C-alpha cells in the first residue's frame, strides 16, 4: 500500500485523462466534460463508454482497462452506484487518481453514505487518490484546463487567467460564480478547485500544492468543514502567500444547512475566527468579499507591514474624501500627512483659494487645468512622498470624461513600489472598460469605498 | 419681513424659472443648465445675460428686472462676487427664491465667507429663500426636471423615475453618482437635492417637503453637518416614510475633511448614531449602501414589524444557502420553519433522496423538472406559508439559462403581500437585463448576500 500523503500534483499537470461516462448527449454532463477537456487540455483524452466507438471524433474505449498510457487520472461521471466498480478498475489499471464528479453520496445519506465509504476503502487500499465525489473538479484558466461538467458557456467570456486560486466546497463557486466574475471583469483566476464531499483529497492536500504553485499568488477558500484543523492551520502558518477563508455554517442554522449540503460538521464562530486569525488567515463573510480580498492580496502580497498604512486619498468629490477618511479610521489606517514638497506640488495645480489637505480634492484643479496633467502631477507627488504608503484614488468615467491617463498612473505607481487602489463610478459600459483596463494594469478597482478600505487594511495588516 | 419658514414648494413645482448666467459656450455650466432646463421643464424659461438677445433660441433678458411673470425662482450661475447684486435684484423683483449654484463662498474661506453672509442677509431681509450656494440644485426624473449644471449626458441613459428622494451635501451624489446608478440599472429616483453650503434652505426644509411629497416613498440623506439637529430629529420622528442617513465626518479626520469641504462642523460618531436610531432613522456607512437601503425601503415601506422576519431562502446553491443562514442569524432574522403543507409541496418536485429543509436548495429539482415549474411551485408554496414573512431567492442568469419566469413570481409575491428579495449572479449583460426586469417588477436585487440581508433586516426592523 502506498502512502496516502502522495502528492496531488498529477491532477494539475496531467499528460492524459480518461473520462468514464463520456456522452454524446449534449444535455448530459458527460458531454460537457468532454467538450471542456477538448477546448483547452493539450494532453491525451480518452473517452470511456462501452456503447460507442467514438465520441466527438475521439476514439472511445469500452473500459478503463483498455485505455493506453499516459493516463494520470480518470474523471468519473456515471451514476453513483456504478462508480465503485469503475474506481476499482482504475486502481487495477494502476491509475494514480480519480476525480469523481457524480453526486449521490454522503450528501444524500443512506445508500450514498455506503457508496462513499466503499470509494474511500478502494482509494486507501490501492494508494489511489480520490478527488470528490459530488464535486465540479478543476478550472484552471492559466493552463486552459477545465476538468469539470460546468457549462461550456464558460469559454464564451474567455477564461481570464489571474493569480488567485480557490479551494471551494461549493459547485456554484466553481461554475456560475466564475462566469459571473470573469464576465464582469472583476478578476482572473489561476485555479478553482471544487472539492465536494472530500472523501480523500481535501483542502489541506490542495493547499499544500497551491502554496508552492508558481501560478498562484493568493489562495481563497470557501469551507463548510475543516476535517483536519491542525494540518490546515499549520499549512496556513507555513504559507508565504496570503490566505483568505470564508467559513460557511458559523451560525447554528448555517451549521445545520451545511450538514445537509456536504455532510459537514461546522463549528463555533468565535473559535474558528480566533484560530484563523492566529494562523495569519484573513477572514471573509461573503462571496464577493472573498473575491475582493483575494484579488487585492494577489496584487499586493508582500507589502511590508512595518509601515503604518498611511494613505493619500485623491478624489474628485469632497464627500467621497470624507467617507474615505471615516472608513480609513475605522480600519486602523491613517490619512497621510503630506510633506511640504508634496503640498507645494499640489498648490501649483490648485486654484489659489484652495488649501491643500488630504483627502486631496482634485476637482477644482481638474476644472482649471484638465484631467490628464492634474492627475499625473498629483499622482507623482503623492507616490514620491516618503510619508505616503499607498494611494487611494477615485475616478468617475463617462459623461464628463474628465478621466486620467491610467496607464501613465500605473507606471508611476509601479516605479514607486506603492500599492494603489481605485474607487470607480461611472456609466455602465465606460466604467466596465476602464475597470478592466485597471485590472490589466494591476490596479484593484472597487465599487464601494468601504470594501476598498477593508481590502487596503488586509494589505497593511 | 416675511417668515423664514416659508415653504420651499416652489422649487419643486415652478411655473417659470430665470437663469442668471445663461451662456452660449458649450463648455460652461450656464449652457448645461439651460440645456437641462429645456430638455425636460415644461414651464417658462428666461435666460438672463446682458450680452445676448437670445440663447439656444430663447429670448434672453439683460437683467432679472426685465423678466416677465411667471417666475418662481432664479438659478444663479455667475462668479461669486456678482451673485450678491443678482440676488438683490431678484429680491427687488419679488421672486420667492434663488438657487445659487456658483461656488466660491464659505468653502473657500475669506472673501467667500463674507459673500455668503451678504447673501444670507438679503434672503433674511426680503423673505426670499436661498438654496445653495455651492450646490448642484435639483434633479427630478419623475417630473423631468434637471435644475442643475450636471452634464446633459445625464439624459443619455434616460432619467429613471423611482420612489426614492435624496438630500445631499455633495455634488458627486447628485451628478456622477446618479448617472452611475441609472446606467447600471440599480434604481430610479424621485428627487435628488444638492444643498451645498445651505446658507438658508437646509435638509430640514427639504425633508419637511419630501415627507409629504406623494412621489417620494423614502428619503435618503448624505449630511456632513446637521445645523438644526432637534428640528431634523423631530421631522424624522414625524415621518411615516423610512429615512436613511449617511453621516460623513464621523471620525476625527473625516470631520476635519468635512470642514474644508462644505465648512461644516461634524460631530461625534456615537452621539449621532444614538440620536438617529432613537428617531427611527436607518443609518448607512457608504454611498452604495445608502442607495441599497433606500431602494429596498421604498419598495417595502410599510411591512409590519410585529412579525418576526421569518425568511424562506430559495437557492440553487447549498453554499449560498448556508452563507445566507449565517447572515440572517447575524442580523436577527430567522430561517422560517416551513409548514408541513409547504414541505409536501416541495417534496413533490424534489428527487426522492432529498429531504426538504430551509434554505431550500432547488437545484436537484430544477435539473429533474426544469426551472419554470420548479421555481413557480416552490415560490407559491413558501409565499402561501403562514410561517413565512419574506422570501429571499437566488438566481444565476446566463450560460445554463435555467432561470425562473420572474413576472409570474412577482405576481405570486404581490398576491401574497410578502416582500421578496433577490441575490443575482450571472453573465454581465444577461444579469443586467434580468436585474432591470426585477427592478421594474418591484423586486430589489443585490449582488452581495450580506447587503441583501442587511436591507431585509431594515425592512423588518
Image (tube, coloured by chain):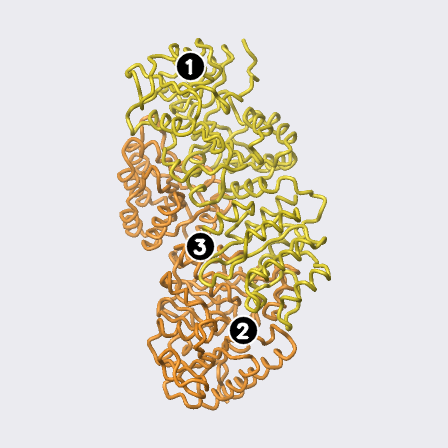
Chain colours: A yellow, B orange
Are the numbered discs 1 and 3 placed on the same chain, yes or no?
yes
Return the chain for callout 1. A
Indicate the chain on which mark 2 is placed: B
Residue at label 1?
A87
Q: Position of residue A145 (x, y in %)?
A: 45, 29
Looking at the rendered structure, which numbered label has been put on residue B134?
Answer: 2
Q: What is the chain letter for disc 3?
A: A
Q: Is residue A57 above or below residue A334?
A: above
Residue at 34% over, 27% down: A29
Task: Please tell me whether residue B278 is drawn above or below residue A255 in the rendered image.
Answer: below
Left of A326 or right of it: where is A223? left
Q: Do the residues labelled 2 and 1 touch (CB within 8 Å)?
A: no
Q: Name the residue under label 3.
A: A430
Are circles 2 and 3 on residues that touch, CB within 8 Å? no
Q: How far apart are marks 1 and 3 (CA)?
A: 51 Å
Q: Residue at x 29, y 29 (%)?
A: A26
Q: Classify residue B191 by image quadrant.
A: bottom left
Single out the mark in the foreground, 2 or 3: 3
The answer to whether residue B270 is visible is: no
Residue A89 point in image, percent of width and height: 41, 11
| Residues at marks 2 and 3, CA–CA distance in whole angstroms | 28 Å
Mark 1 crowd level (few <14, some 14–19, many ≥20, 10 Å Cα) = many
Residue B271, picture quadrant? bottom right
- Within 10 angstroms of label 2, few (less than 14), some, or many (20 or more) residues? many
Looking at the image, can residue A401 be seen?
yes
Q: Identify which residue, A304 or A334, lies in the foreground.
A: A304
Q: Which of marks 1 and 3 is in front?
A: 3
| Labels 2 and 3 share a subunit | no
Q: Which of A37 and A254 is in front in this view?
A: A37
Amino acid at each position: 500500500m502506498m502512502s496516502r500523503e502522495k502528492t496531488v500534483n498529477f491532477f494539475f499537470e496531467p499528460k492524459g485523462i480518461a473520462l468514464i461516462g463520456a456522452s454524446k448527449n449534449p444535455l448530459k454532463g458527460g458531454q460537457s466534460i468532454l467538450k471542456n477537456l477538448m477546448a483547452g487540455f493539450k494532453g491525451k483524452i480518452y473517452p470511456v463508454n462501452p456503447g460507442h466507438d467514438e465520441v466527438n471524433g475521439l476514439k472511445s474505449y469500452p473500459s478503463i482497462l483498455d485505455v493506453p498510457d499516459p493516463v494520470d487520472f480518470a474523471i468519473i461521471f456515471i451514476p453513483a452506484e456504478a462508480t465503485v466498480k469503475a474506481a476499482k478498475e482504475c486502481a487495477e489499471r494502476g491509475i494514480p487518481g480519480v476525480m469523481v464528479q457524480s453526486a449521490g453520496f454522503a450528501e444524500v445519506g443512506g445508500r450514498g453514505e455506503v457508496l462513499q465509504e466503499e470509494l474511500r476503502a478502494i482509494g486507501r487500499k490501492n494508494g489511489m487518490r480520490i478527488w470528490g465525489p459530488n464535486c465540479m473538479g478543476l478550472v484552471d484558466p492559466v493552463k486552459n484546463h477545465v476538468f469539470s461538467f460546468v457549462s461550456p458557456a464558460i469559454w464564451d467570456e474567455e477564461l481570464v487567467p489571474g493569480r488567485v486560486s480557490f479551494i471551494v466546497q461549493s459547485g456554484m463557486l466553481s461554475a456560475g460564480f466564475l462566469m459571473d466574475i470573469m464576465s464582469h471583469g472583476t478578476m482572473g483566476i489561476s485555479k478553482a478547485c471544487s472539492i465536494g464531499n472530500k472523501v480523500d483529497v481535501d483542502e489541506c492536500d490542495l493547499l499544500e500544492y497551491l502554496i508552492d504553485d508558481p501560478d498562484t499568488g493568493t489562495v481563497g477558500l470557501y469551507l463548510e468543514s475543516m476535517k483536519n484543523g491542525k494540518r490546515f492551520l499549520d499549512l496556513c502558518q507555513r504559507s508565504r502567500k496570503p490566505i483568505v477563508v470564508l467559513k460557511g455554517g458559523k451560525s447554528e442554522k448555517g451549521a445545520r444547512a451545511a450538514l445537509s449540503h456536504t455532510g459537514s460538521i461546522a463549528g463555533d464562530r468565535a473559535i474558528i475566527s480566533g484560530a484563523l486569525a492566529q494562523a495569519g488567515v484573513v477572514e471573509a463573510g461573503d462571496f464577493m468579499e472573498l473575491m475582493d480580498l483575494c484579488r487585492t492580496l494577489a496584487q499586493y502580497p508582500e507589502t511590508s507591514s512595518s509601515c503604518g498604512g498611511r494613505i493619500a486619498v485623491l478624489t474628485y468629490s469632497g464627500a467621497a474624501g470624507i467617507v474615505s477618511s471615516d472608513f480609513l479610521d475605522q480600519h486602523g489606517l491613517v490619512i497621510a500627512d503630506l510633506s511640504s514638497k508634496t503640498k507645494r506640488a499640489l498648490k501649483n495645480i490648485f486654484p489659489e483659494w484652495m488649501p491643500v489637505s488630504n483627502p486631496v480634492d482634485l476637482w477644482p484643479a481638474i476644472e482649471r487645468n484638465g484631467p490628464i496633467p492634474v492627475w499625473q502631477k498629483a499622482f507623482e507627488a503623492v507616490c514620491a512622498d516618503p510619508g505616503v504608503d499607498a494611494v487611494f484614488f477615485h475616478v468617475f468615467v463617462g459623461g464628463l470624461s474628465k478621466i486620467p491617463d491610467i496607464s501613465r498612473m500605473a507606471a508611476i505607481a509601479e516605479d514607486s513600489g506603492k500599492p494603489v487602489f481605485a474607487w470607480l463610478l461611472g456609466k455602465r459600459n465606460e466604467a466596465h472598460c476602464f475597470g478592466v483596463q485597471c485590472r490589466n494594469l494591476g490596479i484593484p478597482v472597487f465599487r464601494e469605498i468601504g470594501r476598498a478600505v477593508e481590502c487596503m487594511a488586509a494589505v497593511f495588516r
